[in-house]
Image (cartoon, coloured by chain):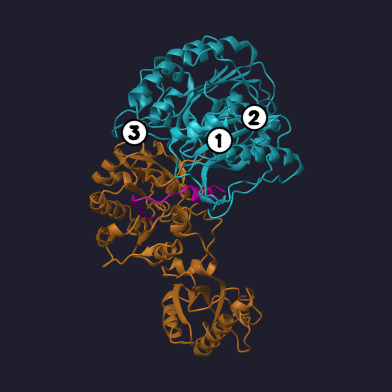
Chain colours: A orange, B cyan
């Protein structure tokens, strides 16, 4: 496997790499010959950097595949998203930006409806409205069980994320959701000795939740399924010999970064400028910085073309603060595309720029989808971006004589 | 596996393919927007050929990986360098340009230091100076053992390559290097019956070497490890139904070519012009010619930008001698990049040109890194170059009906 091979080839160094991720960066023009969000944005700093960089298009997972931010980031960090799967529970938690820790056990929760005999009549409690669901969640948060922290996060309608944090938790567990109506919810069972106490905790929680929800028809019970921890993957330190720091405001990105063994760096505030301040403060302490900018994706998903253009311009305005630190390698790309006209993540490959003194430039002096399509990095699978960056940073040994 | 598949698809033919390898061809511009060595060189013949060719960038092994010439050439010959690994001993021999034969047994040698009790005190003999090591090697060459030829090649400091050539040698052997100090060197043991005689030969050699080095503190003993033969791989004849000839001045390239089942063609002299003379002389006898030009890499590794430019121009001057022979397919590329500004092999993909009457040209009339980045062959893994060349030579059958 290339990944294992690559791990053996990396060598320590003193160079610094910054990976700047504009979430959902790739876009589409509103009309065929028009400009994408990135092409429409006024980005003098990105354009100047492009002229000193190698350009290409990053392919998050494969042709035609739109990825979520979880797999999108796993790929950017050099993991194969198909080999390193995130379970349903952790996915639900990360998906609502919960800051999941490596030993947390997470499950996907539903509010559901039981009849007077305890028989399940609706697995989704009539698709309970999100506002109502949130009130119930706040109530359920009062449940305390010794030796464990319980976190609950409303997702949408009847759905919520359920997370346990504490020592010695196991995730080899059955599910309480029978997946069909006309039967009772199941009692949770452990599938190995290490998960027995966890099963007891969950069953206690479910019992207390049922008591609390007793008079709350149609949402008078909860179902839990997809128990899992985050997968265990080799860290940045193990794979790349990099001391890595994550600068992200949203929990999901911190969660995936923690999985990769990055330190989560303190950001005072929530703006991109605050993130760049954290970058400056921590510059001397790390070899690798991952900096995440959410607004581009948010605007894309909201169908806000102009908002996304402005977000990109905001990023462009901050970029010199990194360049002034003299990084050896700079990566600018996204975890996936989120064209405003689609109001969703899309399958389109993502503009990619890798700057270093040794990158072999493309003589292309603009950063955009069509400029990048002509770049010498070609269509680069996202999981290899870190390999190219490490090579540019002088951190990969020659293979063979 | 694609290789097996491909092998079944090839058919015999009368067409001729010439693969011209400029070692370390790919380069970098001294400043971001400047020209690379190849772009700076005046290459009217290559440029004219580019206009009739398909262009692209060859990826020797994978993104971010700088390869040695060994794996680089294995890929160019259609082998997967990770599946077809060259052992430590053969690597050491090829690395100093030793002309290794398929049944040679090679090991990596160290001069080391023993105390008066025969206990190893320094595995590297104080990193003995290369000049001193060379003198000792000349001495050790006097050791003769019946039924086998022994070759010794100084590598660097305390290191040397040890090669046995003769009938019925085996390489299933332990090592004499205990890898730690404070213990005695180990007696070599065979791991199967076919290697018993070889173990005896090596132990005899080590005993004689110890006697010779007795008064030569700190280099008073040798250690040998990494015994191996070249891997056994299917030949050009078996895989591609090609009668193939190698035209190379340096031993390493002849070694890898012999591994691939090529005939090593006589070159009268050591210049590129001499190599082209050999090509002309042997033209009628072979289907496939591999011609190797070392100077581009040597200049790259020496940081000699201008020298590399001139080497490329020297190549350009010889190219018409091949074209006058009316080859059906011409490949021009390198085994890896060696930018003069890096003074080393690098990870950058390598300019690639494939000419045939049927190649589908790119209407690009120049041969260079940035021109090739726009070519229709895209980023082509080096191991598939031969497949495209064979197809262009009409030597690959249609798959399926």
In this rendering, position of residue A41 left or right of residue B98: left
Is the residue B339 above or below the residue B221 in the image? above
Q: Is residue B216 left or right of residue A189?
A: left
User: Which residue is at 53% across, 32% downward?
Assistant: B137
Q: Position of residue A255 (x, y in %)?
A: 43, 66
For residue B268, which quarter of the picture?
Answer: top right
Q: Could you give the CA–CA distance between mark 1 and mark 3, rounded to whole angstroms?
A: 30 Å
Whichever of labels 2 and 1 marks the residue nearer the N terminus, that label is 2
Query: What residue is disc 2 on?
Result: B144
Q: Secondary structure at mark 1?
A: strand
Query: Which of the chains bears the disc numbered 3?
Result: B
Q: Is residue B271 above or below residue A87?
A: above
Element type at mark 2: loop
Q: Position of residue B360 (x, y in %)?
A: 52, 23
Residue range highlighted in magenta = A1-23
Asked whether the beta carbons under mark 2 and mark 1 sit within 8 Å of each other, the answer is: no
Q: Is residue B59 visible?
A: no
The residues bearing labels 2 and 3 have C-alpha atoms spaced at a distance of: 46 Å
Residue at image mark 3: B341
Q: Closer to the N terminus: mark 1 or mark 3?
A: 1
Q: Which residue is mark 1?
A: B161
In terms of depth relative to the viewer, which is nearer, B114 or A267? B114
Front one among B190 and B28: B190
Q: Is residue B135 visible?
A: yes
Crowd rating for badge 2 (residues with CA inside 10 Å; few <14, some 14–19, many 20+): few
CA gap between label 2 and label 1 equals 17 Å
Mark toward the viewer: 2 or 3: 2
């Amino acid at each position: 496997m290339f990944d294992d091979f690559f791990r053996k080839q990396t060598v320590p160094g003193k160079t610094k790499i910054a990976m700047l991720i504009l979430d959902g960066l790739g876009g589409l023009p509103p009309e065929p010959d028009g400009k994408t969000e990135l092409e429409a944005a006024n980005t003098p700093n990105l354009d100047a950097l492009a002229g000193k960089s190698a350009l290409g298009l990053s392919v998050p997972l494969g042709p035609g595949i739109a990825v979520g931010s979880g797999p999108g980031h796993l790929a950017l960090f050099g993991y194969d998203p198909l080999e390193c799967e995130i379970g349903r529970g952790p996915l639900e938690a990360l998906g609502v930006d919960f800051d999941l820790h490596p030993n947390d056990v997470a499950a996907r929760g539903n509010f559901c409806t039981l009849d007077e005999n305890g028989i399940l009549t609706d697995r989704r409690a009539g698709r309970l409205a999100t506002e109502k669901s949130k009130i119930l969640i706040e109530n359920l948060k009062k449940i305390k069980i010794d030796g464990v922290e319980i976190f609950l996060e409303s997702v949408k309608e009847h759905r919520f994320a359920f997370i346990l944090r504490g020592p010695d938790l196991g995730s080899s567990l059955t599910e309480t959701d029978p997946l069909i109506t006309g039967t009772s919810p199941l009692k949770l069972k452990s599938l190995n000795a290490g998960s027995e106490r966890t099963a007891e905790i969950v069953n206690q929680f479910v019992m207390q939740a049922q008591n609390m929800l007793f008079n709350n028809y149609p949402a008078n019970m909860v179902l839990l399924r997809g128990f899992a921890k985050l997968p265990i993957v080799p860290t940045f330190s193990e794979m790349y010999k990099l001391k890595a720091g994550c600068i992200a405001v949203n929990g999901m990105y911190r969660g995936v970064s923690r999985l990769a063994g990055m330190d989560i760096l303190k950001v005072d505030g929530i703006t991109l400028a605050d993130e760049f301040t954290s970058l400056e403060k921590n510059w001397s302490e790390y070899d690798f910085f991952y900096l995440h900018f959410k607004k581009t994706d948010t605007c894309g998903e909201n169908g806000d073309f102009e908002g996304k253009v402005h977000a990109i311009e905001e990023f462009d305005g901050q970029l010199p603060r990194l360049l002034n630190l003299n990084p050896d390698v700079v990566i600018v790309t996204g975890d996936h595309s989120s064209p405003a006209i689609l109001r969703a993540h899309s399958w389109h490959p993502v503009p990619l720029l890798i700057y270093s003194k040794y990158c072999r430039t493309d003589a292309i002096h603009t950063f955009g989808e069509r400029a990048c399509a002509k770049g010498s990095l070609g269509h680069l699978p996202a999981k290899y971006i870190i390999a190219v960056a490490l090579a540019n940073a002088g951190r990969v040994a020659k293979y063979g004589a």
